[in-house]
Image (cartoon, rainbow, N blue to C red):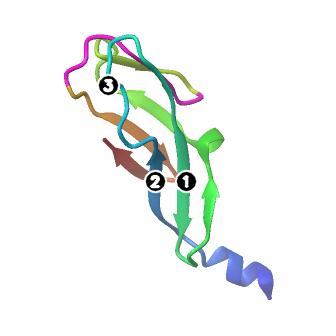
Amino acid sequence: GAEDLKSNVRLSELKVFPSDILSKPQQIDQLSVIAKWSDGTEEDVTPLSRFQSNNPQVASIDENGKIIGKNLRGENLHIEIDKLVKSF
């Protein structure tokens, strides 16, 4: 049935918007995370995502995806949902 089909759908890609962020120190950006599923559907999963900055001295990011740039040096940020990680 429908439940069997739904259980076979897997997360295939994470898209993060905006993709070009933090162009100036103290700039604040709000990330949105879109999941692309194996059946081709897309869904906003921002509230389900875990956000992390590799270096809080460069950019801080809160649990809701709000980023504040500090000492910008092209720092990578990581977003994770269902064991799929997107870095940029």
- Which is nearer the eye, 45 or 22? 22
Q: CA distance from mark 1 to mark 2?
A: 5 Å
**Residue drawn at (46%, 55%) of the image:** 14
Residue 37 position, x and y percent, is 55, 69
CB of mark 1 within 8 Å of CB of mark 2?
A: yes
Q: Residue furthest bottom?
A: 1
Q: Mark 1: which amino acid?
A: Ile
Structural crowding at the residue carrying mark 1, measured as other residues with C-alpha within 10 Å and reported as few (<14), some (14–19) or many (≥20): some
Mark 3 vs mark 1: give the one in front.
3
The disc placed on residue 15 is 2
Q: Quadrant of the C terminus?
A: top left
Judge whether residue 66 is colored magenta.
yes
Q: Residue furthest front?
A: 24
Question: For mark 3, what is the residue?
Answer: 23
- Residue range highlighted in magenta: 64-73
Look at the numbered disc 1 and give the secondary structure of its residue: strand
